[in-house]
Image: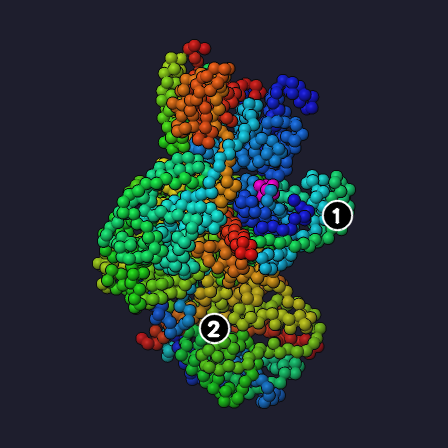
Amino acid sequence: MADENKDKAITSKRKVGVYICYCGGNISDHVDVEKVRERIEKLPEVAAVRTNMFMCSDPGQEMIMEDLKSGAIDRVVVASCAPSLHETTFRGAISRAGRNPYIYEHANIREQVSWVHHGDKATDKATRLVSMATAKAEQLNPLEPIRVEAGKHVTVIGGGIAGLRAAKDLADRGIKVVLLEKSPFLGGQLASLDQIAPTGDKAADLVSDLAGQVLNDDSITVHTCSEVESFEGYVGNFRLGVKKQPPEMDPEKIKPPGAAGEAAGEFIPFAGVYNGDMPSVPAEFTVETGVIILATGFKSYMPSKGEYGFGEYEQVTTLPELIRSMAENKAAGNLMEFNGRKIRSMAMIHCVGSRQIPGIHPENEGGYLNEYCSRTCCSATLNVSNIIRTSHPGTRIFEFYRDIRTYGRGQEELYEEAARNQVVFLRFEDDASPEVVRNISHSGDFPLMVKVKDTLTFGEDVGAPVDLVVLVTGVEPNTISDLVEMMKLPVGTDRFLLEVHPKLRPVELPISGILLAGTCQAPMDVGEACNAAGAAAVKAAALLGRGYVELDPFVALVDLEKCGGTGECVNACLSDGALNMVDMEVDGQTVRRAQVTPALCLGCGVCVGVCPENAIEVAGWTLKQYEAMVDRIVAEEVTA
Amino acid sequence: MYNPKDIIELIAGNVGKTRNPFGIPKFMINRWHKDLDMPDKGDAMLFTGLMYQFVPYIEKSTKYLAKFEDTFLEGLIRFAGYVPRYLSGLGLSVITPGGEKKKFNGILQDIAKILMASNVDFFYRPDLDDYSGVLLYDLGDQEGFVQHARYVTGKLKEAGIKKLITVDPHTTYALKVLFPKYADASFDVKTYFQLVDFQSKNGHRHVTLHDPCFYGRYLDLSEVPKKVLTDLNVECVPVRNAGPFTNCCGGPAESISPKLSTEVGDRRLEELNVTGEKIVSMCPICLGNLRKSGADVEDLSTVIAQCLEK
Amino acid sequence: MTSLADNQSEGKILILATETCAYPGADSVGQAHSSYPANTFILRVRAPALFPEHFYLDCFNKGISGIIIMSCGEECPYDGAYKAMATRLDRVYVMMRQQELDIRRLRLTAICTVCNRAFLNEVNQMNKVVQELGPPQMAQS
Amino acid sequence: MALLNPNFAEEMEPFTEDTALACFNCGTCTAICPLVYEHFPRKMIRYIQIGAKDRILENAQELWRCLHCGLCTLTCPREANPGEIILGLKRFVVANWRRS
Amino acid sequence: MNSIQKTDFDVLVVGGGIAGLQTALDLGDQDYSVAIVEKDATIGGKMIRLSKVFPTLDCASCITTPKMASAAHHDNITLFTYCDVNSLDRMGQTVTANVTQRPRYVDPDKCIGCRQCEYHCPVYVSDAEQGGFSATKAISIPFSNAIPQVAVMDVENCMLCGKCEKVCPTHAIDYFQEPEQFVIKAKSAVLTTGFELTPVSNKHQYGRGEIPNVIDSMQMERLLAPHGPYNRVLRPSDGMEPDSIAYVQCAGSRDKSMGISYCSRVCCMYAVKQAMLLSGSLPLADITIYYMDIRAFGKGYEQFYQNSRAMGIEFINGKFAKISEDENGGVYLRSKSQNGEGGVTASHDLVVLSLGMVPGWNPEGICPVSADSDHFVKTIRPALSPTLTDMEGVFVAGTAAGPKDIVDTITESGAAAIEAAKYMTAREHSRKAAASHR
């Protein structure tokens, strides 16, 4: 081995160290790791090959660091899982060894080899992928991250509970915040609730409390009736164009606040806190900000016409409507009243617009299914049932459910309380939803009948004659297609915004400096939304804490010797200002050459493809590197 | 299975008439105390609740019931006039074998001896020792039960009785839990084995203790007999389902469905037989029902009393 | 070695997969443990717009039998890059025809992070094409 | 089709403190019951919950199979006290018989 | 990292599981100095001991190890492992913790993690890290990716043969090591003390842990882990590959007869996850999940659950009443049937109890923070500030404040970190204000 290394030092100028992970069997069960090691050792640029059970573990990283420190190697390739998981881990290890983290290349031999291929083919492919990585590594150069000044400033989009929480958290950490809210009110969907479960807090109190704190905080500027119209920039230096305009409101439904004499900071039921700022003419302004937190929230599912009789029978309503009616009509009495009618018995049908199953539930109008669980509705329904049963003991309640999901602290108690309050539960299977029909054949003057095959009654058909049917509608992400398009936000199959990784980076998006808070990401209750907001705030605070942000160094580099000044790259460039033609002195002559503004360069490489002289490259992702990798794909000797 | 309605009415009628479920006058049943010299005054009264005394009668009557269960005769019982004489009243008394009666009387006598040996200041008044009515409660005749309980407690209260010593779990439960709740009468109730207070290492044996449901679950008394026996050098071999998790002997169903009762009893016996040691019970119902399943069962009092004699 | 022969006869497929969409998409196929032909080699790219026309031709010249560009499509994080690349590709097709290369050897497609089925489809289809066509023969090489 | 009648729980109230309401139909009582009998005692408990009084009276005999052994009550995860419910039902049925 | 030098910090984090690590990282990244005090010999908590995690089926090690490594290497974070917090009180402006470091009988500064001691130790002991299914040595590094990589001696089982002392290249073995007492002072504290599984001994009907083929969910995690005890799933009694496996849901939750009335929140999902992993490693096995309600409430959970049903995992609605053993090592379960007859008995080769969560720490007598009726740390503003406790400047995150899955735990840890940071910012402001008044 030692002699071989000496020989290599002569033939190859780079000393690439290769570290192949067993991944505790995840890789080694399908890839003959030791065979890969033997083959890779023969490559000219390779100085050392080592294997480990868990390369990402401390001893694994230690191994790399020691080889770097001893000078045995000067480039690193780790062959393990997907780079999204551990690229930063190993770059970190290289940094700790005192080396530049960009002398690193990753070979993905788990997700793209051992988990999809088997036998010799897996081993061969793994060998090729590693050899491709070493070929690239041979050409890697140290890169320095681009440091950009970042103002201690965050913009929160959305003035619901998560947005308010994030804004206040950041202000308390000494960071200036702009809060943008589309509607004239703060409080979001929480403002349209009454008592929340299971804490028993009044939504009005929570919203008033937090919105009050936000409005009283000098570090926070609140703009209601404001929407983001344009977006540009990068972490630390985002620029948002905001349009503020008088709200479109149905005067029948909502009085324009202020008109009724509401003072700033006052809570208006089912609207939110009015901040005293109502534009009369449209205005536009720009916000320069370091980090953007998206807290765009959710909307309630609207049943389609005919879904459980919705829109067909006037006695069919939704849970949000019921909550509103109850809050507006608090008079006690043996029977609850809804729309002026006394309700002797009512049905609550769970999972309307949630947990939809392809092939069983029809697609919604937009051509999608809500396959997810809306998480909050079970507890919300049980809470409402408990309130009704306590204040209107004559009103009977039947709950039709699939699974009762009272998962959180204090929620199972709501379920038990509902049972003790004589709420009758009926359970239906996924493919046997209850039916809401007009009550004709049965005696009694109840207008509707809810029929179900009740698995709790041993699969018998059971009917509930009722005065009211309440559809427990789930939550859907708010329509923010404009933001999604503008900011290139990733959206999951459930149409909620999609985080990078639910555990590693749960509130982050791939775009550095844009964070998620609350129900724009997934259904959550108030406490969970506030936690998510706190988690986003802490990331923003850490990002901006030092006054500067370090960006990936993967930006365009011009080889001035080759550049012929055609300007093709500038024409092709997608980012305004990232590439410019400038006059400069070369060998005593003034020539026009391309110049890069690194903070604005996206690193997309469009310029690379158009340069007639091959004079421009993206640092860390050069065309030569790719060519070297292709050579390894076709090289016969690699797997020999 | 018998129509519970008929059985309930039969038993309720008997309790109403004779203050016991079999319709046999108390003086004919309760004879165990005759040979013993027990004081009629003292600190605590021994209250047998007549359960042990009933066992021979229960066994006999259920034997006949079992014979007719699921036969056409079952239906006949519905008509009060056709209730065979031997299932109730004096007729039953006549056909019940004397040896059996003697055996169960012996259990009670042993208990009295144990109390004496433990220097318990107790007395016995046959006139105040009544059936607790617990069967009426179990069968759902709440009205009948409450009425009977008031009668029993009324007598006790009138006699100024405060402390009671019981001998079986059902009566103990009735006195400790049901009487305070339904008859407004609270006594200081202890079972006899809670009062055992003498030393002996004469046991030298292994036994399988069958905990009755009422001691194990309802009254949480299962640890006491175990400790008493251990102190007497009698080792209780562990049974998987014991204490609060004990399994039923099947006895309580005997009046409605003797078949079911035997089925459950057989299952329990199988569990108990795993240990291979002699089975010891402390409840007349368990004693009777396990015997019916073919077990060789001894009463707890017998085991304790044996240590006394040696 | 037999495996070497196997791999050669299979014809090699190069996949240019975007860092934000298609590359994690391929990972997602891996997480689902869905098997696909092993003669596929994925290069992680920031945007395929980086590659000039000659890159593709060079690849075929070197012996790559098929190329799939898995882009983000409309989801592309670099506004305009997709369009730029698509127009460039038209020129590549022209050049391929000149070289008498079957244009089915080069495909542009959009794969997102959760497009498992689409990914498998693309790979299997290209594999069929390269099996049918055999190794690339270039007119001028 | 059985029609729901939730008022029945109140009809039961004079006969027992435990009116089957705490039960969430998990079936533990049925599985632990030494009777090994068709959905006993949960079936009866469910009938109270949905107010199927006629079903209870039709099947009343089943109640007297109960040994009152208390295993179900001990094991019930929601402390719904199934044993006491059965006892309460017996009282209800006896009262019903006597009334008629 | 190991020897106790620095004892004054901005924040004390009690517990080095995923919640503690995330909290510490989020605070350390804001340039606060953080101490993590962990009772175990390694950080990583329960998560590092799992196989894969739902709903992404990432390997748990892959997610946890980078966080463990970055905490261990963080300039602002100091780890104290194998330490018990004896008291945690506020004294004026300071949170003071009296801590005992238990003896490892290995000098952490000298140990290089070479495992020579472990290889040469002649005493085999049951390996709790592998669910007790395999053996380790009386001196060992807890597991391959433990942090720190320092050996620990099991004094209960060590027979003092002296072999480890002889082979240790750095002379790190110290048979006479004594517990070390020290005091940590901080401005704020975050409790991330985690959970334990519901003790099986609490439920007689489930065999109290005495039936060999009835195992708990954490043991199944080990059987499924890539570096598990057998490298495949075998049942413990006879090493047979189980053909039918049953999951008993709510085995330690939603059961007042055990004194635990709450839902433990993760058991449904981990059972579904384990079932999916099992059907991968044992494609022919029948897997049945006995449940009351499937609580797949989180992001992507419902889809995950529906996938498992499509894969052929059987779900039977009914809580389990009783488990007993048959003579062939099989396990009988009694539950209610879906329809038709009432109680049914089913036989399975292996039964997994989906045990719930109980608090990992009881503050009583240690810390004046209150516990709620469920014995988890009480939070005073669960809606708006879910990490606030009733003790000033002391916050709580993760399963210390009630059952929680990993995603929610990590998010909550971030929230606790911002609360602690806010608390310290406010204090700094008032200190400055007071100083300027003077």
Q: Secondary structure at mark 1?
A: loop
Residue at x-position 71% and y-position 73%: B201
The disc labelled 2 sits on which kind of residue? Thr
| Residue at mark 1 to residue at mark 2: CA–CA distance | 76 Å
Most foreground residue, E14 or D11: E14
Q: Nearer the viewer, residue B169 or B178?
A: B178
Quadrant for residue A329, please give it.
Answer: bottom left
Q: Magenta region's main secondary structure?
A: helix
**Residue E256: x %, y % from top left:** 49, 62
Identify whether E401 is placed above or below B82.
Answer: above
In the displayed structure, A197 sits above or below A390; it is above
Pinpoint the chain carrying mark 1: E
Q: Neighbour class for label 1 at 10 Å: few (<14), some, many (≥20)?
A: some
Residue behind mark 1 = E174
Q: Which residue is mark 2?
A: B62
Secondary element at tag 2: helix
Q: Is residue A303 magenta?
A: no
Q: How is the image coloured?
A: rainbow
The answer to whether residue E35 shows anywhere in this view is yes
Q: Is residue E73 magenta?
A: yes
Could you tell me if residue B286 is visible in this image? no
The local crowd at label 2, few if under 14, some if 14 to 19, many if 20 or more residues have their Cα within 10 Å, is some
* As drawn, E198 above or below B208: above
Image quadrant containing the C terminus of chain A? top right
What's under tag 1, amino acid-wise?
Asp
Write the start and end of the magenta stretch as one range. E69-74
